[in-house]
Amino acid sequence: MKRTIFNAILLLFIVFNINAQPLAFDNATFSFDEWKTRAVPGIFGGTNVQDGINVGLSLSTPVNSANKVVPFGFMLDANYLHQTRRIMAFGFATGYGSYFGEDNNDHWGPINKEAEFRYIPVAGAVRYALENGIVFGGDLGYAFGLHSNWDGGLYIRPIFGFNISEITQLNVSYTSISKSWTWSAVNIGCTFNLNK
């Protein structure tokens, strides 16, 4: 019962907060940048999209049967985004992913205890931002394998993020690399904008 009441109060707060926000077309002299500086910092804390060069780090774990062979890994991320509209940006993304095999005799696809799963993605990137700091989008391209067991595959990475400042974004993403098998992983990370 207490949980239901709490959820109802939270929902009302969100609805009234959204309705209280000014819209650009309500006022000809409206300035989004001026509104942003007056907004509650916890609700909105940053630019719409991280325009320019961004670098980041993500911790990752496979979500399919590969997690018996490779329990965790990390990803270094880099992208360049060009803001074409106030809420949208296009660009390209790359990085480096490395996953560490466990010391056992299991194997999955090209991975075993002697062969770490490492790759460099090269992809197009798109980001779409909402006015409350929430950003979503994805990367689509090819992941080049860095081991003789495999040469790479189709790279897909949908991303959901939240700007906590002008520079910093927290994000959650899903990575899929497909060839004759499909690598799937969930990532939690942080990116930093180098242009601020």
Image: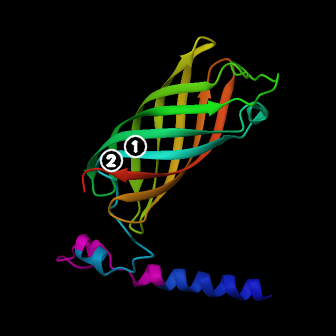
Q: Residue 78: name its quadrant.
A: top left
Number of the label disc, if any, that sits on residue 174? none
- Residue 174 in the image, given as x and y percentages of width and height: 59, 43
Residue 193 lies left or right of residue 75; in this view the side is left
- Residue 3 in the image, given as x and y percentages of width and height: 75, 83
Label 1 or label 2, whichever comes before in sequence order: 2
Q: Amino acid at mark 1?
A: Val
**Residue at the disc numbered 1:** 126
Q: 8 and 194: which one is in front?
A: 194
Q: Amino acid at mark 2?
A: Ala
Q: Residue 21: name its quadrant.
A: bottom left
- Residue found at x 44% / y 40%: 77
Residue 27 lies left or right of residue 112; in this view the side is left
Q: Residue furthest front?
A: 103
- Residue found at x 53% / y 80%: 14
- Residue 43 in the image, given as x and y percentages of width and height: 44, 75
**Residue at the disc numbered 2:** 89
Q: Within the magenta stretch, is there residue 180?
A: no
Q: Under tag 1, what secondary structure?
A: strand
**Which image quarter is the C terminus in?**
bottom left
> Does residue 156 sit above or below 29 in this rendering?
above
The range drawn in magenta is 17-33
> Does residue 12 sit above or below 53 in this rendering?
below
